[in-house]
Amino acid sequence: MRTLITNIKHLYQTESINENKLRVSGADMAYLPGIANAWLIIADGRIHSYGDMADIQETHVDETIDATGRMVLPAWCDSHTHLVFATPRDGEFVDRIRGLTYEEVARRGGGILNSARMLNAMDEQQLFDQSLVRLHKVMGQGTGAIEIKSGYGLCMEGELKMLRVIRRLRESVSIPIRSTFLAAHAYPVEYKEDKEGYIKLIIEQMLPRVASEGLADYMDVFCEKGFFGVPETEQLLEAGYKYGLKPKIHANQLHHSGGVEVGVKYKALSVDHLECIGEKEIESLKGSNTMPTLLPGAAFFLGMHYQPARKIIDAGLPVCLATDYNPGSCPSGNVPLLLSIACTQLKMTPEEAINAVTINGAAAMELEQQMGTIKVGKKAILILTKPIPSLAYIPYDYGNNNVERLLC
Ligand code: NIG
Ligand code: FE
């Protein structure tokens, strides 16, 4: 099957065949290469060729899409989500408006434990059905690769149920899905007084089962005061490595928790959140391959201070953006809205923000050889926009979806 897209107003994030773009860092993030008035051919699901309309050659195709007025970009790569969950937590949303903090809600048995109760009570089919609806919705907003975590089971059966649902989602759509094992998201109620016991359960029982069934690509730990400390995180990450699971961790959301340094030490693919990050943490990221991943949707929804994206970029580091789609701290998987928040609150330019959710998002899921740029041979999972005046219009037109179609 060959598809030709003609009259593309602007084709963004192109990469020549001789380049090997693994991630974009520092000042380079401001640059988004592309071609005005372009064509592109997709053959059997891959990018076959592209160029300037002035040089288009006649060739056989099965389908032609006239993209007049529209732009084409690589699809968003959302590298941090909790898209599989049972029930919204809108009650806690109101409690927080009335003055409770996210941590107070959690201490009262709400938060992640609330989600765990509801998830364990829901049957697998229903969990799958509603997760698939969410997945289709974010794909309609341009998401073309996604990472999804467990972490609302907090027991063997619940965690396996979530991971099986993620596997079924992967089999149901044509976009890449990465699966992350996050049993270390909170201590379940039964282990409140026996934290070592829960860590033992994860390491000795859950991890071997998850690995033997091939249910996860990565391992995550919520490294935070009141959740899992640095020594526990180290213990868990070491065990994960024994089963071939690389870490991607929740770090420095609520406090300077040591999560960034431990992530770097254990060669995490990414350290995610980073609301509480200063000079020391930024310094530790230099020279590492660990991707600083910012989740400003959570800071927005919890009314917290935003991540210092400018300081991280000015330090020459890459920045990745992801939604954190989850029922507690960010009930939205809408990447265009994330881009608006990144531009208005983190003062990232539209080009920087788009680099952060394309090539850098791909890198945070080890998909940089397949996704994230318009390069011959990569997967043709592409965004076709509606007619829009400029690239900046995508984050400018906040709350609206200017993605006409995800081609995949
Ligand atoms: O990334 N911070 C930990 N985990 C999620 C939120 C989980 C929840 O509140 O359900 C996050 O924000
Ligand atoms: Fe998260």
Image: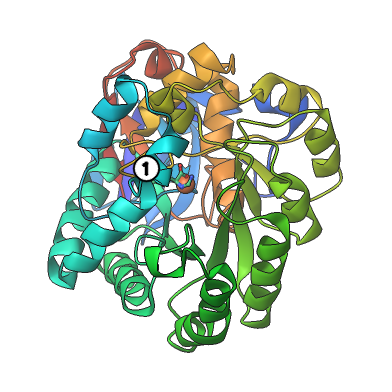
Residue 105: image x %, image y %? 37, 38
Circle 1 sits in a helix, a strand or a loop, which is it? loop
The residue drawn where x is 61% and y is 51% is 363
Q: Is residue 193 visible?
A: yes
Residue 242: image x %, image y %? 67, 82
Within 10 angstroms of label 1, few (less than 14), some, or many (20 or more) residues?
A: many
**Rendered image quadrant of residue 279:** top right
* Identity, as a three-letter code, of the amino acid under mark 1: Tyr
The residue drawn where x is 44% and y is 21% is 303
The residue drawn where x is 57% and y is 73% is 199
Relative to residue 15, is residue 53 drawn left or right?
left
The residue drawn where x is 64% and y is 50% is 270
State how the image is colored: rainbow
Q: Nearer the viewer, residue 167 or 101?
A: 101
Work out whether 217 lies above or below 400: below
Q: Nearer the viewer, residue 4 or 298?
A: 298
Q: Which residue is mark 1?
A: 325
Work out whether 373 lies above or below 146: above
**Quarter of the figure that contains the N terminus:** bottom left
Relative to residue 199, is residue 260 drawn left or right?
right
Count of numbered badges drawn on the protein: 1
Residue 378: image x %, image y %? 51, 55
Work out whether 360 lies above or below 189: above
Relative to residue 105, is residue 54 drawn left or right?
right
Residue 244: image x %, image y %? 63, 78
**Rendered image quadrant of residue 16:** top right
Relative to residue 79, is residue 134 drawn left or right?
left
> Which quarter of the frame holds ligand 1?
top left
Q: Is residue 19 visible?
A: no
In the image, the residue with mark 1 has its CB under 8 Å from the nearest atom of ligand 2: no
Q: Nearer the viewer, residue 191 or 166?
A: 191
Work out whether 222 lies above or below 374: below
